[in-house]
Image (cartoon, rainbow, N blue to C red):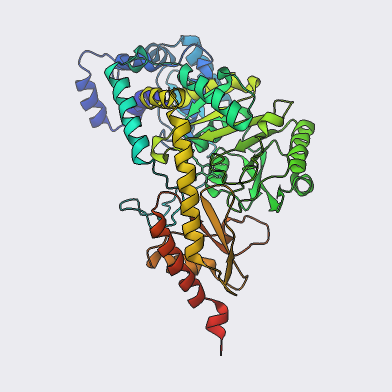
Amino acid sequence: MPHLVFMSLLVHQCTPQLVQKRSNQMQKSKTNFPDLSALIPVMPEPGKRSRALYTAIRRLIETGQLPAGAKLPTTRDLARRLGLSRGAAVDAYEVLIAEGFAEARVGAGTFVAAEVPQLKADVPEIVDDGADYSGPPHPCTLGIAIADERTRRVFRQLLHRRLERPQPNFYSYGDPRGEHELRQAIADYARVARGVRCHPGQVVVTSGIRHGLDLVMRAALHPGDAVWVEDPCYLSAQATITGVGLRTVPVPVDREGIDVAAGEVIGGKAKAVYCTPSHQFPLGVTLTMRRRLALIDWAKRNDAWIFEDDYDSEFRFSGPPLASIQGMDDAGRVIYLGSFSKVLFPGLRIGYAILPEPLVEPVLAQRQQMDRQPPSLPQGAIADLLNEGHFAAHLRRVRKRAEACRDALVDGLGAGGNSFSVAAPEQGLHLIVSLADEFDDEKLVTAAAEAGIGALPLSTHYLAAPIRKGLVLGYSGFEPEDLRRAGKKLAGIVHDLSPATADGP
Ligand SMILES: Cc1ncc(COP(=O)(O)O)c(C=O)c1O
Protein backbone atom coordinates (compact mmCIF):
# COMPACT_ATOMS: atom_id res chain seq x y z
CA MET A 1 0.00 0.00 0.00
CA PRO A 2 2.54 2.71 0.92
CA HIS A 3 4.40 2.50 -2.35
CA LEU A 4 1.18 2.72 -4.33
CA VAL A 5 0.30 5.90 -2.55
CA PHE A 6 3.87 7.03 -2.88
CA MET A 7 3.78 6.70 -6.66
CA SER A 8 0.55 8.54 -7.13
CA LEU A 9 1.30 11.33 -4.72
CA LEU A 10 4.80 11.91 -5.92
CA VAL A 11 3.47 13.32 -9.13
CA HIS A 12 2.28 16.32 -7.21
CA GLN A 13 5.72 17.26 -6.03
CA CYS A 14 7.40 16.89 -9.39
CA THR A 15 8.53 19.85 -11.39
CA PRO A 16 6.01 20.98 -14.02
CA GLN A 17 8.32 19.66 -16.75
CA LEU A 18 8.47 16.24 -15.18
CA VAL A 19 4.74 16.15 -14.62
CA GLN A 20 4.32 17.08 -18.28
CA LYS A 21 6.75 14.38 -19.36
CA ARG A 22 5.06 11.77 -17.21
CA SER A 23 1.59 12.76 -18.32
CA ASN A 24 2.71 12.39 -21.93
CA GLN A 25 3.82 8.89 -21.05
CA MET A 26 0.45 8.25 -19.53
CA GLN A 27 -1.08 8.34 -22.96
CA LYS A 28 -4.81 8.84 -22.58
CA SER A 29 -4.92 9.52 -18.86
CA LYS A 30 -6.83 12.71 -18.13
CA THR A 31 -5.22 13.28 -14.75
CA ASN A 32 -1.65 13.68 -13.58
CA PHE A 33 -1.56 10.15 -12.14
CA PRO A 34 0.50 7.31 -13.52
CA ASP A 35 -1.57 4.31 -14.54
CA LEU A 36 -1.62 2.12 -11.45
CA SER A 37 -4.09 -0.42 -12.71
CA ALA A 38 -1.38 -3.06 -13.23
CA LEU A 39 -0.56 -2.84 -9.54
CA ILE A 40 -4.06 -3.32 -8.25
CA PRO A 41 -3.58 -7.04 -7.33
CA VAL A 42 -1.07 -6.10 -4.63
CA MET A 43 -3.62 -4.01 -2.78
CA PRO A 44 -4.20 -5.32 0.72
CA GLU A 45 -7.31 -7.30 1.44
CA PRO A 46 -10.37 -5.53 2.87
CA GLY A 47 -9.78 -4.10 6.30
CA LYS A 48 -9.17 -0.67 7.67
CA ARG A 49 -8.14 0.91 4.40
CA SER A 50 -8.67 4.45 5.59
CA ARG A 51 -6.17 3.78 8.37
CA ALA A 52 -3.63 2.26 5.98
CA LEU A 53 -3.99 5.21 3.63
CA TYR A 54 -3.62 7.68 6.48
CA THR A 55 -0.49 5.89 7.75
CA ALA A 56 1.10 5.80 4.30
CA ILE A 57 0.51 9.49 3.59
CA ARG A 58 1.58 10.50 7.06
CA ARG A 59 4.85 8.61 6.67
CA LEU A 60 5.52 10.37 3.36
CA ILE A 61 4.92 13.72 5.04
CA GLU A 62 6.99 12.90 8.12
CA THR A 63 9.93 11.73 6.08
CA GLY A 64 9.80 14.84 3.90
CA GLN A 65 9.02 12.94 0.72
CA LEU A 66 5.84 14.98 0.52
CA PRO A 67 7.07 18.48 1.31
CA ALA A 68 5.21 21.23 3.12
CA GLY A 69 2.64 22.85 0.88
CA ALA A 70 2.49 19.99 -1.65
CA LYS A 71 -0.95 19.50 -3.11
CA LEU A 72 -2.60 16.18 -2.37
CA PRO A 73 -4.78 14.49 -4.98
CA THR A 74 -8.53 14.78 -4.66
CA THR A 75 -10.17 12.07 -2.63
CA ARG A 76 -12.12 11.01 -5.69
CA ASP A 77 -9.01 10.48 -7.82
CA LEU A 78 -7.10 8.80 -5.03
CA ALA A 79 -9.98 6.43 -4.25
CA ARG A 80 -10.43 5.54 -7.91
CA ARG A 81 -6.74 4.93 -8.50
CA LEU A 82 -6.24 2.77 -5.42
CA GLY A 83 -9.54 0.92 -5.69
CA LEU A 84 -10.76 2.28 -2.38
CA SER A 85 -14.14 3.65 -1.47
CA ARG A 86 -14.24 7.43 -1.57
CA GLY A 87 -15.31 7.34 2.07
CA ALA A 88 -12.00 5.66 3.00
CA ALA A 89 -10.01 8.43 1.31
CA VAL A 90 -12.18 11.13 2.93
CA ASP A 91 -11.72 9.52 6.36
CA ALA A 92 -7.94 9.35 5.89
CA TYR A 93 -7.79 13.05 4.88
CA GLU A 94 -9.97 14.06 7.80
CA VAL A 95 -7.59 12.43 10.26
CA LEU A 96 -4.56 13.99 8.53
CA ILE A 97 -6.22 17.41 8.76
CA ALA A 98 -7.31 16.90 12.37
CA GLU A 99 -3.76 15.94 13.37
CA GLY A 100 -2.20 18.91 11.60
CA PHE A 101 -0.47 17.00 8.80
CA ALA A 102 -2.66 18.49 6.07
CA GLU A 103 -4.92 21.48 5.58
CA ALA A 104 -7.99 21.97 3.42
CA ARG A 105 -8.23 25.21 1.42
CA VAL A 106 -11.72 26.06 0.31
CA GLY A 107 -12.05 25.76 -3.45
CA ALA A 108 -8.38 24.76 -3.89
CA GLY A 109 -8.11 21.26 -2.42
CA THR A 110 -6.04 19.59 0.32
CA PHE A 111 -2.37 20.42 0.92
CA VAL A 112 0.42 19.20 3.14
CA ALA A 113 0.48 21.57 6.12
CA ALA A 114 3.07 24.36 6.16
CA GLU A 115 4.51 23.02 9.41
CA VAL A 116 4.17 19.36 10.20
CA PRO A 117 5.12 17.32 13.26
CA GLN A 118 8.55 15.79 12.68
CA LEU A 119 9.54 12.15 13.14
CA LYS A 120 10.45 11.27 16.70
CA ALA A 121 14.01 12.07 17.62
CA ASP A 122 14.71 8.60 18.99
CA VAL A 123 14.52 6.98 15.57
CA PRO A 124 18.17 6.08 15.01
CA GLU A 125 20.11 7.42 12.10
CA ILE A 126 20.90 4.82 9.47
CA VAL A 127 24.61 4.33 9.77
CA ASP A 128 27.13 2.39 7.77
CA ASP A 129 28.20 -0.42 10.11
CA GLY A 130 31.71 -0.20 8.72
CA ALA A 131 31.80 -3.88 7.86
CA ASP A 132 33.37 -5.05 4.63
CA TYR A 133 30.98 -7.50 2.99
CA SER A 134 32.99 -7.90 -0.19
CA GLY A 135 35.52 -10.62 0.65
CA PRO A 136 35.52 -13.81 2.72
CA PRO A 137 35.09 -13.03 6.43
CA HIS A 138 38.02 -13.17 8.81
CA PRO A 139 38.09 -16.18 11.17
CA CYS A 140 36.15 -15.55 14.40
CA THR A 141 33.75 -13.08 12.74
CA LEU A 142 30.32 -13.48 14.30
CA GLY A 143 27.15 -14.36 12.43
CA ILE A 144 28.67 -16.71 9.85
CA ALA A 145 27.10 -20.11 9.21
CA ILE A 146 27.72 -22.38 6.26
CA ALA A 147 25.69 -25.53 5.69
CA ASP A 148 27.95 -28.46 4.81
CA GLU A 149 28.23 -29.90 1.31
CA ARG A 150 25.73 -32.68 2.04
CA THR A 151 23.03 -30.28 3.21
CA ARG A 152 23.73 -27.92 0.32
CA ARG A 153 23.29 -30.80 -2.12
CA VAL A 154 20.00 -31.89 -0.55
CA PHE A 155 18.76 -28.30 -0.43
CA ARG A 156 19.66 -27.82 -4.09
CA GLN A 157 17.65 -30.93 -4.98
CA LEU A 158 14.66 -29.78 -2.94
CA LEU A 159 14.71 -26.32 -4.51
CA HIS A 160 15.02 -27.87 -7.93
CA ARG A 161 12.10 -30.22 -7.29
CA ARG A 162 9.97 -27.30 -6.11
CA LEU A 163 10.83 -25.37 -9.27
CA GLU A 164 10.12 -28.36 -11.48
CA ARG A 165 6.70 -28.81 -9.94
CA PRO A 166 5.69 -25.27 -9.07
CA GLN A 167 2.61 -24.91 -6.93
CA PRO A 168 -0.12 -22.30 -7.43
CA ASN A 169 1.32 -20.27 -4.56
CA PHE A 170 4.29 -19.34 -6.75
CA TYR A 171 1.99 -17.35 -8.97
CA SER A 172 -0.18 -15.54 -6.50
CA TYR A 173 -0.28 -13.79 -3.18
CA GLY A 174 -0.75 -16.16 -0.32
CA ASP A 175 -1.18 -16.38 3.41
CA PRO A 176 0.71 -13.55 5.15
CA ARG A 177 1.69 -16.06 7.87
CA GLY A 178 3.57 -18.15 5.29
CA GLU A 179 2.92 -21.54 3.74
CA HIS A 180 0.89 -23.91 5.88
CA GLU A 181 3.22 -26.88 5.38
CA LEU A 182 6.21 -24.94 6.69
CA ARG A 183 4.25 -23.53 9.61
CA GLN A 184 3.09 -27.04 10.48
CA ALA A 185 6.67 -28.34 10.26
CA ILE A 186 7.97 -25.47 12.42
CA ALA A 187 5.22 -26.01 15.02
CA ASP A 188 6.05 -29.74 15.19
CA TYR A 189 9.78 -29.03 15.46
CA ALA A 190 9.44 -26.28 18.11
CA ARG A 191 7.11 -28.49 20.16
CA VAL A 192 9.51 -31.43 20.18
CA ALA A 193 12.87 -29.63 20.29
CA ARG A 194 12.00 -26.64 22.50
CA GLY A 195 8.80 -27.57 24.34
CA VAL A 196 6.92 -24.73 22.64
CA ARG A 197 3.16 -25.12 22.96
CA CYS A 198 1.59 -24.04 19.70
CA HIS A 199 -0.37 -24.95 16.59
CA PRO A 200 0.47 -23.86 13.03
CA GLY A 201 -2.06 -21.02 13.18
CA GLN A 202 0.18 -19.24 15.68
CA VAL A 203 3.29 -19.48 13.50
CA VAL A 204 4.29 -16.57 11.26
CA VAL A 205 7.21 -17.12 8.89
CA THR A 206 9.46 -14.06 8.92
CA SER A 207 12.69 -13.02 7.27
CA GLY A 208 14.57 -13.61 10.52
CA ILE A 209 14.38 -12.84 14.21
CA ARG A 210 14.86 -9.11 13.82
CA HIS A 211 12.05 -8.94 11.30
CA GLY A 212 9.84 -10.91 13.70
CA LEU A 213 10.73 -8.55 16.53
CA ASP A 214 9.96 -5.49 14.44
CA LEU A 215 6.70 -6.93 13.10
CA VAL A 216 5.30 -8.10 16.43
CA MET A 217 6.44 -5.06 18.40
CA ARG A 218 4.70 -2.77 15.92
CA ALA A 219 1.50 -4.78 16.36
CA ALA A 220 1.62 -5.34 20.13
CA LEU A 221 3.07 -2.10 21.52
CA HIS A 222 2.68 1.65 21.12
CA PRO A 223 5.36 4.22 20.29
CA GLY A 224 7.00 5.41 23.48
CA ASP A 225 6.28 2.19 25.44
CA ALA A 226 9.17 0.97 27.58
CA VAL A 227 10.84 -2.36 26.79
CA TRP A 228 13.37 -4.11 29.02
CA VAL A 229 16.50 -5.21 27.24
CA GLU A 230 19.35 -7.24 28.67
CA ASP A 231 22.47 -5.31 29.62
CA PRO A 232 24.80 -6.23 27.91
CA CYS A 233 22.63 -6.72 24.89
CA TYR A 234 22.37 -7.92 21.26
CA LEU A 235 22.79 -4.43 19.86
CA SER A 236 21.05 -5.17 16.56
CA ALA A 237 17.88 -6.06 18.45
CA GLN A 238 18.18 -2.92 20.52
CA ALA A 239 18.39 -0.90 17.29
CA THR A 240 15.29 -2.68 15.96
CA ILE A 241 13.37 -1.87 19.15
CA THR A 242 14.26 1.83 19.16
CA GLY A 243 13.60 1.91 15.42
CA VAL A 244 9.99 0.95 16.15
CA GLY A 245 9.79 4.05 18.37
CA LEU A 246 9.98 2.19 21.69
CA ARG A 247 12.08 3.11 24.71
CA THR A 248 14.64 0.57 25.88
CA VAL A 249 15.27 0.10 29.60
CA PRO A 250 18.58 -1.71 30.21
CA VAL A 251 18.30 -4.41 32.90
CA PRO A 252 21.55 -5.95 34.18
CA VAL A 253 22.49 -9.55 33.47
CA ASP A 254 24.30 -11.61 36.11
CA ARG A 255 25.26 -15.28 36.39
CA GLU A 256 21.57 -16.27 36.39
CA GLY A 257 20.64 -14.18 33.37
CA ILE A 258 18.48 -11.05 33.32
CA ASP A 259 17.96 -9.73 36.86
CA VAL A 260 14.18 -9.47 37.10
CA ALA A 261 14.19 -7.93 40.58
CA ALA A 262 16.57 -5.21 39.40
CA GLY A 263 14.32 -4.63 36.40
CA GLU A 264 11.32 -4.08 38.68
CA VAL A 265 13.26 -1.38 40.51
CA ILE A 266 14.60 0.29 37.35
CA GLY A 267 11.48 0.13 35.21
CA GLY A 268 8.80 -2.19 36.55
CA LYS A 269 6.05 -0.74 34.39
CA ALA A 270 7.61 -1.68 31.06
CA LYS A 271 5.27 -3.21 28.51
CA ALA A 272 7.66 -5.90 27.26
CA VAL A 273 11.02 -7.55 27.68
CA TYR A 274 13.34 -8.70 24.90
CA CYS A 275 15.65 -11.48 26.08
CA THR A 276 17.83 -14.41 25.01
CA PRO A 277 17.10 -16.87 27.86
CA SER A 278 18.63 -20.07 26.46
CA HIS A 279 21.96 -18.45 25.69
CA GLN A 280 22.30 -14.81 26.64
CA PHE A 281 23.92 -12.72 23.95
CA PRO A 282 26.74 -11.87 24.37
CA LEU A 283 27.61 -13.30 27.82
CA GLY A 284 26.37 -16.83 27.12
CA VAL A 285 24.62 -17.49 30.45
CA THR A 286 21.39 -19.52 30.61
CA LEU A 287 18.45 -17.95 32.42
CA THR A 288 17.90 -20.04 35.53
CA MET A 289 14.58 -21.67 36.31
CA ARG A 290 13.79 -19.31 39.19
CA ARG A 291 14.49 -16.27 37.02
CA ARG A 292 12.26 -17.72 34.28
CA LEU A 293 9.44 -18.06 36.78
CA ALA A 294 10.09 -14.53 38.05
CA LEU A 295 10.00 -13.15 34.51
CA ILE A 296 6.71 -14.87 33.72
CA ASP A 297 5.28 -13.65 37.01
CA TRP A 298 6.38 -10.07 36.24
CA ALA A 299 4.83 -10.28 32.76
CA LYS A 300 1.53 -11.55 34.20
CA ARG A 301 1.34 -8.84 36.85
CA ASN A 302 2.11 -6.08 34.36
CA ASP A 303 0.28 -7.40 31.29
CA ALA A 304 3.66 -7.29 29.60
CA TRP A 305 4.97 -9.35 26.67
CA ILE A 306 8.09 -11.53 26.76
CA PHE A 307 9.98 -11.61 23.45
CA GLU A 308 12.01 -14.82 23.69
CA ASP A 309 14.88 -14.84 21.16
CA ASP A 310 15.96 -18.48 20.79
CA TYR A 311 18.56 -17.86 18.11
CA ASP A 312 21.03 -20.73 18.64
CA SER A 313 19.56 -23.32 21.00
CA GLU A 314 20.07 -26.07 18.39
CA PHE A 315 23.76 -25.95 19.33
CA ARG A 316 23.71 -27.51 22.78
CA PHE A 317 26.90 -29.53 23.35
CA SER A 318 26.46 -30.78 26.90
CA GLY A 319 24.19 -30.46 29.88
CA PRO A 320 20.42 -30.64 29.80
CA PRO A 321 18.75 -28.00 27.63
CA LEU A 322 16.11 -25.95 29.42
CA ALA A 323 12.81 -25.83 27.57
CA SER A 324 11.67 -22.51 26.16
CA ILE A 325 9.98 -19.95 28.40
CA GLN A 326 7.06 -20.09 25.99
CA GLY A 327 6.46 -23.70 27.02
CA MET A 328 6.37 -22.74 30.72
CA ASP A 329 4.06 -19.79 30.35
CA ASP A 330 0.42 -20.49 31.19
CA ALA A 331 -0.73 -16.92 30.60
CA GLY A 332 0.00 -16.49 26.88
CA ARG A 333 2.51 -13.67 27.38
CA VAL A 334 5.44 -15.07 25.33
CA ILE A 335 6.34 -14.35 21.71
CA TYR A 336 8.81 -17.05 20.68
CA LEU A 337 11.30 -16.02 17.96
CA GLY A 338 13.31 -18.60 16.04
CA SER A 339 15.52 -18.51 12.96
CA PHE A 340 17.20 -20.67 10.33
CA SER A 341 20.09 -18.17 10.19
CA LYS A 342 22.38 -20.12 12.51
CA VAL A 343 21.18 -23.62 11.89
CA LEU A 344 21.20 -23.37 8.07
CA PHE A 345 22.67 -20.07 6.87
CA PRO A 346 21.86 -16.36 7.39
CA GLY A 347 21.46 -15.52 3.70
CA LEU A 348 18.27 -17.60 3.62
CA ARG A 349 16.52 -14.86 5.57
CA ILE A 350 13.90 -17.20 6.99
CA GLY A 351 12.84 -17.22 10.62
CA TYR A 352 9.59 -17.48 12.53
CA ALA A 353 7.55 -15.92 15.29
CA ILE A 354 5.21 -18.06 17.37
CA LEU A 355 2.48 -15.84 18.73
CA PRO A 356 -0.02 -15.89 21.55
CA GLU A 357 -3.48 -16.23 19.95
CA PRO A 358 -4.62 -12.62 20.57
CA LEU A 359 -1.63 -11.26 18.65
CA VAL A 360 -2.21 -13.29 15.47
CA GLU A 361 -4.72 -10.92 13.87
CA PRO A 362 -2.90 -7.64 14.69
CA VAL A 363 0.39 -9.09 13.46
CA LEU A 364 -1.17 -10.23 10.19
CA ALA A 365 -2.75 -6.82 9.65
CA GLN A 366 0.70 -5.30 10.20
CA ARG A 367 2.31 -7.71 7.78
CA GLN A 368 -0.23 -6.94 5.07
CA GLN A 369 1.09 -3.41 5.12
CA MET A 370 4.75 -4.32 5.33
CA ASP A 371 5.90 -7.05 2.97
CA ARG A 372 2.69 -9.02 2.36
CA GLN A 373 4.11 -12.54 2.82
CA PRO A 374 7.36 -14.52 2.95
CA PRO A 375 8.85 -15.96 -0.28
CA SER A 376 7.31 -19.26 -1.44
CA LEU A 377 10.34 -21.03 -2.91
CA PRO A 378 12.65 -21.32 0.14
CA GLN A 379 9.67 -22.00 2.38
CA GLY A 380 8.74 -25.07 0.35
CA ALA A 381 12.30 -26.40 0.32
CA ILE A 382 12.73 -25.85 4.08
CA ALA A 383 9.42 -27.62 4.76
CA ASP A 384 10.70 -30.60 2.73
CA LEU A 385 14.01 -30.50 4.59
CA LEU A 386 12.18 -30.72 7.92
CA ASN A 387 9.49 -33.18 6.85
CA GLU A 388 11.70 -35.64 5.02
CA GLY A 389 14.17 -36.23 7.84
CA HIS A 390 17.08 -34.30 6.30
CA PHE A 391 17.03 -31.61 8.96
CA ALA A 392 17.50 -33.98 11.90
CA ALA A 393 20.53 -35.54 10.17
CA HIS A 394 21.85 -32.07 9.30
CA LEU A 395 21.48 -30.98 12.94
CA ARG A 396 23.55 -33.89 14.19
CA ARG A 397 26.33 -33.02 11.73
CA VAL A 398 26.40 -29.25 12.34
CA ARG A 399 26.32 -29.68 16.10
CA LYS A 400 29.30 -32.00 15.97
CA ARG A 401 31.14 -29.67 13.67
CA ALA A 402 30.41 -26.61 15.83
CA GLU A 403 31.77 -28.46 18.85
CA ALA A 404 34.98 -29.28 16.97
CA CYS A 405 35.30 -25.62 15.91
CA ARG A 406 34.76 -24.42 19.48
CA ASP A 407 37.40 -26.82 20.78
CA ALA A 408 39.91 -25.75 18.11
CA LEU A 409 39.48 -22.07 18.97
CA VAL A 410 39.72 -22.68 22.72
CA ASP A 411 42.78 -24.81 22.15
CA GLY A 412 44.41 -22.15 19.97
CA LEU A 413 43.77 -19.43 22.54
CA GLY A 414 45.45 -21.53 25.22
CA ALA A 415 45.52 -20.82 28.93
CA GLY A 416 45.89 -17.05 28.78
CA GLY A 417 47.98 -16.76 31.93
CA ASN A 418 47.54 -13.37 33.57
CA SER A 419 46.23 -11.78 30.36
CA PHE A 420 42.85 -13.42 29.82
CA SER A 421 40.58 -16.33 30.61
CA VAL A 422 38.33 -18.32 28.35
CA ALA A 423 35.76 -21.02 29.06
CA ALA A 424 34.40 -23.39 26.44
CA PRO A 425 30.67 -22.63 26.22
CA GLU A 426 28.15 -25.48 26.52
CA GLN A 427 25.98 -23.94 23.83
CA GLY A 428 26.04 -21.68 20.82
CA LEU A 429 28.45 -20.43 18.22
CA HIS A 430 30.42 -17.77 20.06
CA LEU A 431 32.59 -17.45 23.13
CA ILE A 432 33.92 -14.73 25.38
CA VAL A 433 37.58 -14.06 26.08
CA SER A 434 37.46 -12.28 29.46
CA LEU A 435 39.99 -9.52 30.04
CA ALA A 436 41.02 -7.52 33.07
CA ASP A 437 39.47 -4.03 33.40
CA GLU A 438 42.74 -2.36 32.44
CA PHE A 439 42.54 -3.66 28.87
CA ASP A 440 41.27 -1.54 26.02
CA ASP A 441 39.16 -4.16 24.22
CA GLU A 442 38.30 -1.84 21.32
CA LYS A 443 41.99 -1.32 20.63
CA LEU A 444 42.48 -5.07 20.74
CA VAL A 445 39.72 -5.58 18.20
CA THR A 446 41.39 -3.12 15.84
CA ALA A 447 44.71 -4.91 16.22
CA ALA A 448 42.98 -8.27 15.64
CA ALA A 449 41.32 -6.98 12.46
CA GLU A 450 44.71 -5.82 11.17
CA ALA A 451 45.94 -9.36 11.75
CA GLY A 452 42.98 -10.83 9.84
CA ILE A 453 40.85 -11.87 12.83
CA GLY A 454 37.22 -10.79 13.29
CA ALA A 455 36.28 -10.03 16.92
CA LEU A 456 33.91 -7.71 18.74
CA PRO A 457 34.67 -5.79 21.95
CA LEU A 458 32.51 -6.95 24.85
CA SER A 459 32.48 -3.50 26.48
CA THR A 460 30.50 -1.87 23.66
CA HIS A 461 27.58 -4.26 24.23
CA TYR A 462 26.84 -2.64 27.59
CA LEU A 463 24.19 0.05 27.76
CA ALA A 464 24.25 1.21 31.39
CA ALA A 465 25.57 -1.58 33.64
CA PRO A 466 29.24 -1.44 34.70
CA ILE A 467 31.13 -2.73 31.71
CA ARG A 468 33.25 -5.85 31.52
CA LYS A 469 36.17 -6.01 29.12
CA GLY A 470 36.49 -8.89 26.72
CA LEU A 471 36.40 -10.16 23.17
CA VAL A 472 33.41 -11.81 21.54
CA LEU A 473 34.54 -14.45 19.04
CA GLY A 474 32.49 -16.54 16.64
CA TYR A 475 33.54 -20.06 15.70
CA SER A 476 31.03 -21.17 13.11
CA GLY A 477 31.57 -21.01 9.37
CA PHE A 478 35.35 -21.59 9.53
CA GLU A 479 37.68 -24.56 9.38
CA PRO A 480 38.85 -25.79 12.81
CA GLU A 481 42.48 -25.38 11.77
CA ASP A 482 41.92 -21.73 10.76
CA LEU A 483 40.28 -21.12 14.12
CA ARG A 484 43.14 -22.76 15.99
CA ARG A 485 45.64 -20.53 14.16
CA ALA A 486 43.50 -17.43 14.72
CA GLY A 487 43.22 -18.27 18.43
CA LYS A 488 46.98 -18.59 18.77
CA LYS A 489 47.60 -15.33 16.94
CA LEU A 490 44.99 -13.53 19.01
CA ALA A 491 46.47 -14.79 22.28
CA GLY A 492 49.77 -13.26 21.16
CA ILE A 493 48.11 -9.94 20.36
CA VAL A 494 46.37 -9.85 23.74
CA HIS A 495 49.64 -10.57 25.48
CA ASP A 496 51.49 -7.87 23.47
CA LEU A 497 48.83 -5.26 24.21
CA SER A 498 48.40 -6.26 27.83
CA PRO A 499 48.67 -3.20 30.11
CA ALA A 500 50.91 -5.33 32.34
CA THR A 501 53.31 -5.93 29.43
CA ALA A 502 53.20 -2.30 28.31
CA ASP A 503 53.78 -0.94 31.80
CA GLY A 504 56.25 -3.64 32.74
CA PRO A 505 59.81 -3.09 33.84
C1 LIG B 1 21.06 -12.75 19.69
C2 LIG B 1 20.72 -12.96 18.26
N1 LIG B 1 19.45 -13.03 17.88
C3 LIG B 1 19.11 -13.25 16.60
C4 LIG B 1 20.05 -13.41 15.62
C5 LIG B 1 19.66 -13.79 14.21
O1 LIG B 1 18.84 -12.97 13.65
P1 LIG B 1 18.20 -13.23 12.22
O2 LIG B 1 17.25 -14.38 12.34
O3 LIG B 1 17.50 -11.93 11.99
O4 LIG B 1 19.29 -13.51 11.23
C6 LIG B 1 21.38 -13.28 15.93
C7 LIG B 1 22.39 -13.37 14.86
O5 LIG B 1 23.54 -13.17 14.98
C8 LIG B 1 21.73 -13.07 17.29
O6 LIG B 1 23.02 -12.99 17.65
Q: Is residue 96 visible from the viewing direction of this image?
A: no
Q: Is residue 461 left or right of residue 269?
A: left
- Residue sitting at x 42%, y 16%: 174
Question: For this rendering, which residue is in front, 334 or 215?
Answer: 334
- Residue sitting at x 36%, y 14%: 172
Q: Is residue 352 left or right of residue 149?
A: right
Question: For this rendering, which residue is in front, 183 or 313?
Answer: 313
Residue furthest toward the bottom?
A: 505
Image coordinates of residue 323 in percent, x first then y, are 66, 35
Image coordinates of residue 58 in percent, x first then y, are 49, 29
Which quadrant is the N terminus positioned in? Answer: top left
The vertical placement of 125 against 293, above or below, is: below
- Residue sitting at x 38%, y 67%: 450
Question: For this rendering, which residue is in front, 262 or 220?
Answer: 262
Question: For this rendering, which residue is in front, 319 or 176?
Answer: 319
- Residue sitting at x 45%, y 40%: 397
Q: Is residue 15 visible from the viewing direction of this image?
A: yes
Q: To which quarter of the image does residue 199 belong?
A: top right
The vertical placement of 108 against 253, above or below, is: above
Which quadrant is the C terminus positioned in? Answer: bottom right
The vertical placement of 505 against 89, above or below, is: below
Image coordinates of residue 443 in percent, x first then y, are 49, 69
Total numbered labels placed on residues in the image: 0
